[in-house]
């Protein structure tokens, strides 16, 4: 049981380049989330998908787009990367939004924008 | 607006000590309060969680204390070990609210 799988694990981008971070879960969860983690800032929600076919903005959505491809997969796209987007990105899944159940996290993608 | 305030930002204790991490919230709609543990290079993982209908929950050496009237909750680690060195995040959610996290506490347990 792989849980939540993120790819890639590391990435270096030049300012202005685009890329997509991939996330897949095999737990049949309805809800999926993208967080970014910066030193001293905790985990901040970028976008989430409460169920297949829906997406909503979180706390820090500017500069990002998401796609809930199917129930398993939730991708995060940076259209024009900026140095301020240098961060560690975590994907998470949960049985459903609002349920008092565990959120499972992937291993993270460490992104550097130069 | 930070929905969950966590302190301290960092904490150093000796082996066997009892580190305490505190969190406070404003939104009275929150009804689920988990703590996540994160080791370097890994994603956060659920450590222990509590609902507001109880004032305390213990799992092994980890205890959550919950004060509903003060809107505060805390994590205590009994007989702390060097292997407990990690970053700890408190969080909160409800049926209508997404999971929101505190800023984290980096705990170091010295041998």
Image: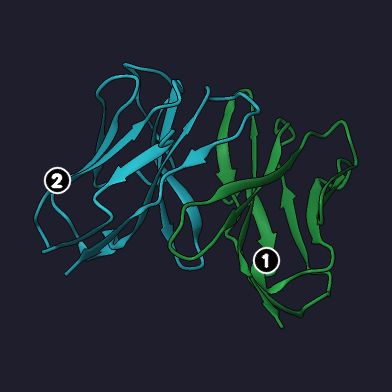
Percent coordinates x, y for residue B50 in the rendering:
77, 38
Q: Given the image, what chain letter belongs to the residue carrying mark 2?
A: A
- The residues bearing labels 2 and 1 have C-alpha atoms spaced at a distance of 39 Å
Q: Which residue is mark 2?
A: A79
Q: Nearer the viewer, residue A5 or B57?
A: A5
The quarter of the displayed image where residue B93 is located? top right
Q: Give the number of callouts.
A: 2
What color was chain A assigned in the picture?
Answer: cyan
Residue A63 falls left or right of residue B106: left
Percent coordinates x, y for residue A100 in the rendering:
66, 28
Residue B43 falls left or right of residue B62: left
> In the figure, B72 relative to B106: above or below?
above
Residue B42 falls left or right of residue B106: left
Q: Residue at x 46, y 50 (%)?
A: A44
Q: Which residue is mark 1?
A: B84
Q: Given the image, what chain letter belongs to the residue carrying mark 1?
A: B
């Amino acid at each position: 049981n792989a849980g939540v799988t993120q790819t890639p694990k590391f990435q270096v981008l030049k300012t202005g380049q685009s890329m997509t971070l991939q996330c897949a879960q095999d737990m049949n969860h309805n809800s999926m989330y993208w967080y970014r983690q910066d030193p001293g800032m905790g985990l901040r929600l970028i976008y989430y998908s409460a169920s297949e076919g829906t997406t909503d903005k979180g706390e820090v959505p500017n500069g990002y787009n998401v796609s809930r491809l199917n129930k398993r997969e939730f991708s995060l796209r940076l259209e024009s990367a900026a140095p301020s987007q240098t961060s560690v990105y975590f994907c998470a899944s949960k049985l459903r939004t609002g349920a008092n159940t565990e959120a499972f996290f992937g291993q993270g993608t460490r992104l550097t924008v130069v | 607006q930070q929905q969950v305030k966590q302190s301290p930002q960092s904490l150093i204790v000796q082996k066997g000590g009892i580190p305490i991490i505190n969190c406070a919230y404003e939104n009275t709609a929150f009804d689920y309060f988990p703590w996540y543990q994160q080791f370097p290079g890994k994603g956060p993982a659920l450590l222990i969680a509590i609902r507001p209908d109880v004032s305390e929950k213990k799992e092994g050496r980890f205890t959550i204390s919950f004060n509903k009237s003060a809107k505060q909750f805390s994590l205590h680690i009994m007989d702390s070990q060097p292997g407990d060195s990690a970053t700890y995040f408190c969080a909160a959610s409800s049926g209508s609210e997404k999971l929101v996290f505190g800023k984290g506490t980096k705990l170091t347990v010295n041998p």
